[in-house]
Amino acid sequence: MGFSKDELRRLEELLLKDRERTVRKLSRFAAEFMDTAGDGAWMERSTFTLHAAEQGTDTMEREKAFLFTNEEGRRLAAIDAALRKLYREPDTFGQCERCGGAIGFARLEALPHTTLCISCQTLQEAGGG
């Protein structure tokens, strides 16, 4: 098992690009959130809004924002973990953490931070662990 140096370099490049994109999304979101929260409009709406539909919309927007940052934060953590493994254990990079089998270069090219082979991923999604 194991990948060639060129394949490992390609996977590193994909991970670094994905990391940059994810950090940029989180930074952009943080800046937009601070702009919205910083002008007092959000606080004023949430404190003094009398209409229940507007309060529901504000709450829903905050929940969507939390879910977005939570999802992107998990993605960033997965990318960082994959990079650590790539740098520290290049011989075992691409090994499924569940069954120990090979994940496969094509799958890693599509999703370089994955830790499961397609079989184990399918089993997990089906509720089998």
Image (cartoon, grey):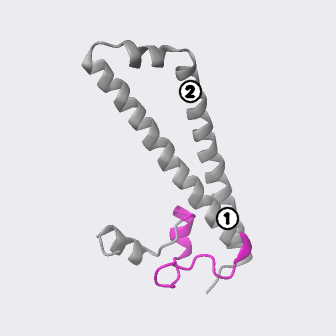
SS for callout 2: helix
Q: Is residue 94 magenta?
A: yes
The residues bearing labels 1 and 2 have C-alpha atoms spaced at a distance of 29 Å
Residue sticking out furthest to the front: 47
For the stretch drawn in magenta, the main secondary structure is: loop
Q: Is residue 73 magenta?
A: no
- Which residue is drawn at the image coordinates 58% and 76% (left, top)? 94
Identify the image quadrant of residue 33: top right
List x then y, in percent, for residue 63.
39, 36
Q: Does 66 sit above or below residue 16?
A: above
- For the residue pair 98 and 21, the one nearer the viewer reads as 98
Q: Does 111 sit above or below residue 103?
A: above
The amino acid pointed to by label 1 is: Leu
List x then y, in percent, for residue 6.
72, 72
Residue at which label 2 appears: 32
Residue at which label 1 appears: 83
